[in-house]
Image: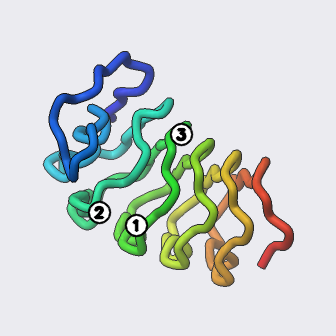
Protein backbone atom coordinates (compact mmCIF):
# COMPACT_ATOMS: atom_id res chain seq x y z
CA UNK A 1 0.00 0.00 0.00
CA UNK A 2 1.28 3.44 -0.91
CA UNK A 3 -0.49 6.20 1.00
CA UNK A 4 0.79 9.75 0.73
CA UNK A 5 -2.53 11.38 1.54
CA UNK A 6 -2.82 14.19 4.07
CA UNK A 7 0.85 15.12 3.94
CA UNK A 8 1.93 18.75 3.56
CA UNK A 9 3.90 18.01 0.42
CA UNK A 10 5.46 21.21 -0.85
CA UNK A 11 5.01 22.25 -4.48
CA UNK A 12 7.82 21.05 -6.69
CA UNK A 13 10.16 23.57 -8.25
CA UNK A 14 10.31 21.22 -11.26
CA UNK A 15 8.39 22.30 -14.31
CA UNK A 16 6.55 20.13 -16.82
CA UNK A 17 4.96 21.81 -19.80
CA UNK A 18 5.58 25.20 -18.13
CA UNK A 19 3.39 24.49 -15.08
CA UNK A 20 4.35 23.60 -11.55
CA UNK A 21 3.98 19.94 -10.76
CA UNK A 22 2.41 18.87 -7.49
CA UNK A 23 4.64 16.40 -5.62
CA UNK A 24 1.90 13.80 -5.58
CA UNK A 25 1.72 14.04 -9.36
CA UNK A 26 5.38 13.06 -9.51
CA UNK A 27 4.61 10.13 -7.21
CA UNK A 28 1.72 9.09 -9.44
CA UNK A 29 3.87 9.37 -12.55
CA UNK A 30 6.49 7.10 -10.95
CA UNK A 31 4.04 4.41 -9.84
CA UNK A 32 4.85 2.17 -12.79
CA UNK A 33 8.11 1.32 -10.98
CA UNK A 34 6.07 -0.39 -8.25
CA UNK A 35 4.88 -3.40 -10.24
CA UNK A 36 3.50 -5.31 -7.24
CA UNK A 37 1.70 -2.40 -5.62
CA UNK A 38 -1.87 -3.33 -4.62
CA UNK A 39 -3.30 -0.08 -3.21
CA UNK A 40 -2.61 3.59 -3.93
CA UNK A 41 -4.14 6.50 -1.97
CA UNK A 42 -3.61 10.10 -3.03
CA UNK A 43 -6.11 12.50 -1.45
CA UNK A 44 -7.02 16.08 -0.80
CA UNK A 45 -6.11 18.04 -3.89
CA UNK A 46 -2.81 16.27 -4.37
CA UNK A 47 -3.73 15.13 -7.88
CA UNK A 48 -5.47 17.25 -10.47
CA UNK A 49 -4.85 15.06 -13.51
CA UNK A 50 -3.64 11.59 -14.31
CA UNK A 51 -0.27 12.05 -16.02
CA UNK A 52 0.11 10.84 -19.60
CA UNK A 53 3.35 9.11 -18.64
CA UNK A 54 1.49 6.74 -16.36
CA UNK A 55 1.10 3.36 -17.96
CA UNK A 56 -1.70 1.46 -16.28
CA UNK A 57 -0.62 -1.83 -17.92
CA UNK A 58 2.55 -1.78 -15.81
CA UNK A 59 0.43 -1.74 -12.63
CA UNK A 60 -1.34 -5.02 -13.28
CA UNK A 61 -1.56 -5.96 -9.58
CA UNK A 62 -3.29 -2.73 -8.46
CA UNK A 63 -6.56 -3.69 -6.76
CA UNK A 64 -7.48 -0.40 -5.03
CA UNK A 65 -7.04 3.15 -6.29
CA UNK A 66 -8.14 6.11 -4.20
CA UNK A 67 -7.91 9.54 -5.85
CA UNK A 68 -10.39 11.25 -3.53
CA UNK A 69 -10.65 15.02 -3.39
CA UNK A 70 -8.46 16.03 -6.29
CA UNK A 71 -9.20 18.09 -9.34
CA UNK A 72 -9.28 15.28 -11.89
CA UNK A 73 -11.52 16.26 -14.78
CA UNK A 74 -10.84 13.42 -17.20
CA UNK A 75 -9.94 9.73 -17.28
CA UNK A 76 -8.32 8.23 -20.33
CA UNK A 77 -9.48 5.06 -22.09
CA UNK A 78 -6.35 3.17 -21.00
CA UNK A 79 -7.68 3.29 -17.45
CA UNK A 80 -9.32 -0.04 -18.34
CA UNK A 81 -5.86 -1.64 -18.32
CA UNK A 82 -6.17 -1.92 -14.53
CA UNK A 83 -7.60 -5.44 -14.86
CA UNK A 84 -7.10 -6.34 -11.17
CA UNK A 85 -8.85 -3.20 -9.90
CA UNK A 86 -11.59 -3.98 -7.35
CA UNK A 87 -12.07 -0.66 -5.55
CA UNK A 88 -12.00 2.74 -7.24
CA UNK A 89 -12.58 6.01 -5.39
CA UNK A 90 -12.86 9.14 -7.52
CA UNK A 91 -15.00 11.04 -5.02
CA UNK A 92 -14.87 14.85 -5.02
CA UNK A 93 -13.16 15.46 -8.32
CA UNK A 94 -14.30 17.40 -11.39
CA UNK A 95 -15.41 14.56 -13.65
CA UNK A 96 -18.17 15.49 -16.11
CA UNK A 97 -18.06 12.10 -17.85
CA UNK A 98 -16.51 8.64 -17.60
CA UNK A 99 -14.83 6.76 -20.43
CA UNK A 100 -16.77 3.75 -21.72
CA UNK A 101 -13.58 1.73 -21.21
CA UNK A 102 -14.17 1.94 -17.45
CA UNK A 103 -17.04 -0.51 -17.97
CA UNK A 104 -14.53 -3.18 -19.02
CA UNK A 105 -13.30 -3.44 -15.42
CA UNK A 106 -15.32 -6.58 -14.75
CA UNK A 107 -13.72 -7.20 -11.35
CA UNK A 108 -14.75 -3.82 -9.95
CA UNK A 109 -16.80 -4.30 -6.77
CA UNK A 110 -16.74 -0.78 -5.33
CA UNK A 111 -16.99 2.49 -7.24
CA UNK A 112 -17.33 5.90 -5.60
CA UNK A 113 -17.84 8.68 -8.12
CA UNK A 114 -19.87 10.89 -5.82
CA UNK A 115 -19.42 14.66 -5.60
CA UNK A 116 -18.38 15.13 -9.22
CA UNK A 117 -20.10 16.85 -12.13
CA UNK A 118 -21.30 13.76 -13.97
CA UNK A 119 -24.20 14.46 -16.31
CA UNK A 120 -24.46 10.95 -17.70
CA UNK A 121 -22.94 7.49 -17.37
CA UNK A 122 -21.62 5.40 -20.26
CA UNK A 123 -24.29 3.31 -22.00
CA UNK A 124 -22.28 0.18 -21.15
CA UNK A 125 -22.35 0.97 -17.41
CA UNK A 126 -24.63 -2.02 -16.82
CA UNK A 127 -21.73 -4.34 -17.74
CA UNK A 128 -20.25 -3.69 -14.30
CA UNK A 129 -22.14 -6.67 -12.89
CA UNK A 130 -19.72 -7.23 -10.02
CA UNK A 131 -20.46 -3.88 -8.37
CA UNK A 132 -21.61 -4.33 -4.79
CA UNK A 133 -21.04 -0.74 -3.78
CA UNK A 134 -21.84 2.23 -6.06
CA UNK A 135 -21.94 5.83 -4.87
CA UNK A 136 -23.32 8.34 -7.39
CA UNK A 137 -24.36 10.94 -4.83
CA UNK A 138 -24.14 14.68 -5.60
CA UNK A 139 -23.66 14.68 -9.34
CA UNK A 140 -25.72 16.22 -12.12
CA UNK A 141 -27.23 12.98 -13.43
CA UNK A 142 -30.60 13.33 -15.16
CA UNK A 143 -31.02 9.66 -16.12
CA UNK A 144 -29.37 6.28 -15.72
CA UNK A 145 -28.47 4.03 -18.66
Report if the CB atoms under discs 3 and 2 are less than 8 Å apart: no
Image x and y of residue 9, in percent: 31, 21
Q: CA distance from mark 3 to mark 2?
A: 18 Å
Crowding near the residue tagged with mark 1, few <14, some 14–19, many ≥20 C-alpha atoms within 10 Å? some
- 89 sits left or right of 65 in the view: right
Image x and y of residue 69, in percent: 55, 37
Image x and y of residue 80, in percent: 42, 71
Image x and y of residue 97, in percent: 61, 67
Q: Is residue 130 above or below residue 63?
A: below
Q: Kindly identify the residue that appears in the image at 51 percent across and 44 percent down.
A: 71
Disc 1 designates what residue?
79
- 66 sits left or right of 93 in the view: left
Inspect this view and state whether residue 36 appears: no
Badge 1 element: helix
Of circles 3 and 2, which is in front? 3
Front residue (pair 115, 61): 115
Q: Which mark is residue 68?
A: 3
Q: Kindly identify the residue that appears in the image at 46 percent across and 63 percent down.
A: 75
For the N terminus, give its image quadrant. top left
**Residue at the far bottom in the pictured view:** 123
**Residue at the far right in the pictured view:** 142
Q: CA distance from mark 1 to mark 2?
A: 6 Å
Report if the CB atoms under discs 1 and 2 are less than 8 Å apart: yes
Crowding near the residue tagged with mark 2, few <14, some 14–19, many ≥20 C-alpha atoms within 10 Å? some
Inspect this view and state whether residue 16 appears: yes
Question: How many numbered marks, from 0 up?
Answer: 3
Q: Looking at the rendering, which quadrant does residue 10 occupy?
A: top left
Disc 2 designates what residue?
56
Front residue (pair 47, 21): 21
Report if the CB atoms under discs 1 and 3 are less than 8 Å apart: no
Amino acid sequence: VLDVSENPLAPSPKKMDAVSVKPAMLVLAALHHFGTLHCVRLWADQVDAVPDVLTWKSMSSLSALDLNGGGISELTEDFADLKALRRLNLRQNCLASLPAALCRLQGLTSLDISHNQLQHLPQSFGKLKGLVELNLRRNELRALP
